[in-house]
Amino acid sequence: MIDIGDRTTRARIGVALAALALTAGGVGFYFGSAGNDSIPAQAQSQDSRKVLYWYDPMVPQEKYDQPGLSSMGMQTIPKYADESGQQAGVRVDPAAIQSLGMRVVTAQAGLIGSALDVTGTIDFDQRHVAIIQARSGGFVQRVYNRAPGDLVRAGAPIADLLIPEWGGAQQEFLAIRRLGDQRLTAASKQRMRLLGMSDSVIARVGRTGGTNGVVTLTTPIGGAIQELNVRSGMTLSAGQTLAQVMGIETVWLNAAVPEARAGEVRVGQTATADVAAFPGAPFSGHVEAILPTADAASRTITVRIALPNFGLHLRPGMFATVHLGQNAHSALLVPTEAVIRTGKRTLVMLAQSGARFRPAEVQIGRESNGRTEILAGLSPGEKVVASGQFLLDSEASLTGIPARPISGDPK
C-alpha cells in the first residue's frame, strides 16, 4: 500500500498527473480555434470572447456546456462564437508556424503548358504503298537481284516478263494500221492498253514497226521492298502480285496516349520525338490522326504523327519518346504540392488573417513544372499553404470546419 504522506511518492504521482494532462491537451498545443493557445482551456473560458460550447477534437460531434472530459476521456476545448461562419478556421500559434514547417505562397497568374510525354513506335506510312502486278499472263524472263528489305529508287527495275499475248496484239495492230482504217486502228490500240501496254510501248511499236513481247516491271515509288514474290522462270497469271514497295520519305509515329489525357491532343498540333539512336536531334512533325479505338489492355489511344524522314534515319520498329505539349497559356497557378486530393474532391488550405487556416475546394486543370492550374475556387492574390497543409487539413476535419465550396462561402 502506498503511503500518501511519503514525499517521494507524492512527487511521482504529481509527475504522472502532469504527463496525463499534457497528453490530453496535446491537440490544442499548436491548434486552437482562437485566443492564446498557451493558456489552459479553463482560463480561456474567462476570456471576454463568447464560448458557444466545449468539444473534444477527437469526437467533434459531441458538444458540452461546460469544460471537462469527453466520452473519450480527453480534455475538451472551447468553440468561440467568432469562429463560426466566414471566420471559421484552424488557428495556429504564430510562434509554432515555423516549428511546424509551414510555407505559405500566393496564387498568381502565369503561363503554363501541357507536358504530355508518351512512348511511340515508328511505322511505315501506309499511304505510300506500291503494289506491282502482272497485267497479263506470261513468264518471268529475268529478275534484278532484289530482296525484301532492299531500298530502291523510283523507276528501279524489278523483273523482265515475257508475255506472248503482247506479240500477237502488236502484230495485229501493225496489220490494221497498214489497211488505213482509223477506227480499227484506234480499237487495236485500245486492246493493247487493256493488255497492260503503256502508251510509250505502243508508240515504239508504231514507230519501229517491230514487235516485242518482253516488258520490264519497275517500281513507281522509291522505298523499301516489303514483299518480293518473283523468281526467274516462274509462270505468271494476270493480276498476280510480284512485289510491294513501302515509301519511307515520310513515316508514321504511333504514340500511345493514356485515355485520361486523350482530350489534350488535337489533330494538326505539333509534336517532337526523341530517338535513342540520335540523341540531341529531335524529329518534328504533326498529329495526323487520333485513332477511334482504345487498347483494352493498356487503356491508351493511338495518336498517329507524320514525320518527314530526312536522311532516312527513322526506321520502322524504332521506339521514340514523344512530346505532345501544347502551347503555353495564361492561368491561375499554385504549387502542385499545395493541392490535396482526397479522391472525392480537391482542396487547398487557405491562409487567412489572424493565423487562421481553412480548407477550400478547387477545380484543377493542367500540371507542368511543379505548378498546377486552378480553374475555379481561388482568386489571384489568395494565399495557400504549400507545406504542412495535410496536418492542417486533418485538424480541420477533426474540428468539423467545412471547406469553402467552389461557388464561394456558404451564406
Image (cartoon, rainbow, N blue to C red):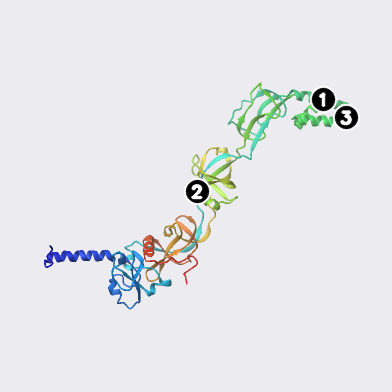
Corner quadrant of residue 238? top right
Mark 3 falls on what kind of element? loop
Marks 2 and 1, Cα distance to the nearest angstrom?
66 Å
**CA neighbours of label 1 inside 10 A, class few (<14), some (14 to 19), many (20+):** some
Chain-order first, disc 3 or disc 2: 2
Image coordinates for residue 24, horizontal then vertical, percent: 27, 65
**CA neighbours of label 2 inside 10 A, class few (<14), some (14 to 19), many (20+):** some
Seen from the viewer's position, the closer of residues 256 and 83 is: 83
- The amino acid type of the residue labelled 2 equals Asp
* Residue 211 against residue 294 in the figure, above or below: above
Seen from the viewer's position, the closer of residues 405 and 169 is: 405
> Would you name the residue on which mark 2 appears?
117
Mark 2 falls on what kind of element? strand
- The amino acid type of the residue labelled 3 equals Asp
Mark 1 falls on what kind of element? helix
Chain-order first, disc 2 or disc 1: 2
Corner quadrant of residue 191? top right
Chain-order first, disc 1 or disc 3: 1
What residue is shown at x 31% (from left), y 77% (from top)?
A: 47
